[in-house]
Amino acid sequence: MSREDYRPFVPAPGQSRLAGPTPRAHSEARLKSPGAQALFSAWEELSKVPFKGITTDGIVKPGLFAREENGAPSAEMTVAATALLAMLGPQARDSMCFPVDTRVWQQWQNTEILVERHGLRLDEITVPVRDAIMQVLQASLSQKGFQDARDVMRLNQFLGDLVGGPQVLGEWAYTFCLFGTPSNSDPWGWQLFGHHLSLSCLVIGGQMVLSPTFMGAEPTYADHGPFAGISLFQDEERCGLALMRSLSPEQQCLALVSRSMKGADHPPGRWHFADHLHMGGAHQDNRIVPYEGLLASRLTPQQKRDLLDLVSAYVAPLPAGPHAARMAEVERHLGETHFCWIGEQGEASTFYYRIQSPVIFIEFDHHSGVFLTNKEPAKFHVHAIVRTPNGNDYGVDTLRQHYAEADHHRG
């Protein structure tokens, strides 16, 4: 892909999508639009609903998640987070720190519009504090996971430079929160969110839950400037398409939900102007998403291995121990896993697919342009989501089990 493949949006007079010289000024201008008002109003209503988790029928399936060590790098994480706290004054701590069981976990979103008043905004703090936050991420994630997160942030800067809005779409246009007190044994965690990136990490002793995760890019490739050569989502795109194309005609018929990526061609509620075909986006913590598509029990042994390899690409941000535990969890429920597809299967085709089981929920979607000019979905704008259904997003069920064990020991 070259720069000729994507072109920046050139607004008509009075229609700038980047009104305002700063993120907060831009947000105040953007929030006046009917679309933004409708989106954030809907999110506000959803945020009032008690957390349950994504389910297939509104009923949480119990007993899916174990409270057990999985090799989380808690010692390194605690050192990094403690060093960060030592750099902050009372006001910054008050902005950044929350109880570990707060519903603030759920207040993430992935637009460029800055409406939140909580957390530390990375483009409004000193470089040493910002670097200390990055140290927390680096201690928590795999090398690839940290690199991918940083590349999402860098591509956001590339987009800002491309459309003439680097103050709004910047490398550091993200918010960081800390939950609980960093500890090698007690529960705590962190969250980073902003345009095209949201990571939520809970750790209890040697156990880590990294969910939900959201990564995206528009465009997915930088062909010039300081970030030239950065490219994201190649494995997720290529391996997803290869799996679909490996299916027999009968299997493809079962997997295929629709050949059309156009929102107008889908039933009401299936396509959203902000999330497009995604069903597990921001503030969708309690969404009911019935299974669709091909059951993995109908796959050949090779296709099952390919499906697990595809899942592995999405949970790659986890460090080695938690990654192995997560893959074992997914494999235990492989027989209940569904793979569904929307779109065509040509090399140049755009598409959506979902991998869904009782313990994992993965979505890949090609989007139309927001800041670029493509009115139809294009391969250079991608959103990818990983969630843990049935109540363990944000490690909620793991934390519940921890409290139950603690109460038992005290008793």
Image (spheres, rainbow, N blue to C red):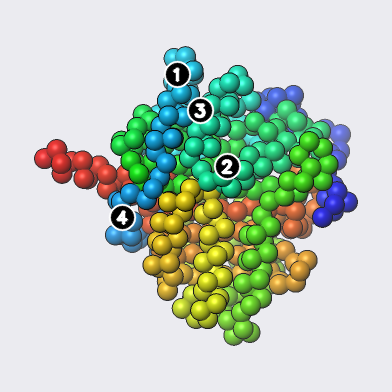
Residue, disc 3? 119
**Comparing marks 4 and 3, which lies closer to the viewer?**
4
Three-letter code, disc 3? Gly
Rounded to the nearest whole Å, what is the CA distance between mark 2 and mark 3? 20 Å
**Can I make out residue 103 in this image?**
no
Residue, disc 1? 86
Rounded to the nearest whole Å, what is the CA distance between mark 4 and mark 2? 26 Å
267 lies above or below 42: below
Which callout, 4 or 3, points at the residue further toward the start of the chain? 4
**Comparing marks 4 and 1, which lies closer to the viewer?**
1
Other-residue count near label 3 (Cα within 10 Å), few / some / many at <14 / 14–19 / ≥20: many
In the rendered structure, find residue 162 and report the number of the disc placed on it: none
**Comparing marks 1 and 3, which lies closer to the viewer?**
1
Other-residue count near label 4 (Cα within 10 Å), few / some / many at <14 / 14–19 / ≥20: few
Residue, disc 4? 66
Which callout, 1 or 3, points at the residue further toward the start of the chain? 1
Which callout, 1 or 2, points at the residue further toward the start of the chain? 1
Q: Quadrant of residue 98?
A: top left
76 lies above or below 70: above
Residue, disc 2? 146
Three-letter code, disc 2? Phe
Query: If the image is split into quadrants, where does the N terminus sit?
Result: bottom right
- Total marks in image: 4
The image shows residue 108 at horizontal and vertical percentages of: 52, 39
Secondary structure at numbered mark 3: loop
Q: Are marks 4 and 1 in contact (CB under 8 Å)?
A: no
Q: Are marks 1 and 3 in contact (CB under 8 Å)?
A: no
Q: Which residue occupies 60% across, 37% down? A: 194
